Amino acid sequence: MLIKSIVVGPLKVNCFIVADEGSKKAMVVDPGDEPDRIMDIIKNNDFVVEYIICTHGHFDHVGAVSDLKKETDAKVLIHKDEFEIYDAAKDMAAFWGYDLDPLPDPDVLVKDGEDITAGDLSFKVFHTPGHSPGGICLYGEGIVITGDTLFAGSVGRTDFHGGDTNKLKESFKRLMSLPENIRVLPGHGPETTIGREKRENMFSDELLL
């Protein structure tokens, strides 16, 4: 497995390009901005992008989806409960003072427990609502990509439309049930591990009550 990460946009979103080393088949997770830089990584590594995956639909995580779709013709994938948020991303961006290209309709609406494959790689979809109604994490191959559900030392905010603290609590519990050596690749900030977050996350005691 090859993992290339790039921090994009003014809100410094972690975009991950995850590829099967043998086949070069890849998925791009949370292409929030700067499509040219993302495409440079794809082209320089001869990746064949099969999926553009949005862990959730907030504008800072989807800003480059339209351009990447045009360049790669990959399938755009979101959770079935996230369509409203995804559809409103352009308006949300405008509210915060940013311009967003119109987004393509998603090609795939996933639900909890489904598998996403790229070559020999396979990831399980975890529906992890709380930060947004259809937030997802991708678990497999020794990693979990958590979007804005879990960060190093923190969790996603719940005061946006569709946020729910009680649901975030359950999503956090689910992630904390994973093996402690699993690498956590969050939507913002540095990489961490499940074990470290069980011990050090400031929300562990509060949210695991």
Image (cartoon, helix red, strand yellow):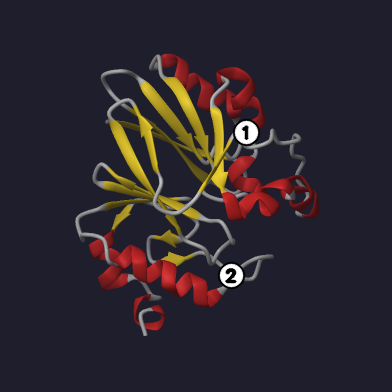
- Label 2 Cα neighbours within 10 Å, binned few <14 / some 14-19 / many ≥20: some
In the rendered structure, the answer to whether residue 96 lies left or right of residue 75 reads right
Figure check: 183 above or below 9: below
Figure check: 154 above or below 56: below
Camera sees residue 201: yes
**Which quadrant: the C terminus?**
bottom left
Distance of label 1 from label 2 (alpha carbons): 24 Å
- Quarter of the image for residue 61 reads top right
Locate residue 22, reporting x and y percent. 26, 19
Identify which amino acid the numbered label 1 is placed on. Ala
In the rendered structure, the answer to whether residue 56 lies left or right of residue 182 reads right
Q: Say which residue appears at 34% left-offset and 63% top-offset.
A: 175
Q: Write down the residue under mark 1.
A: 64
Which of the marked residues, 1 or 2, is nearer the chain's N terminus? 1
Q: Write down the residue under mark 2.
A: 158
**Which quadrant: the N terminus?**
top left
Figure check: 74 above or below 138: above
Q: Say which residue appears at 26% left-offset and 64% top-offset.
A: 196
- The secondary element bearing badge 2 is classed as loop
Q: Say which residue appears at 29% left-offset and 45% top-offset.
A: 140
Figure check: 173 above or below 81: below
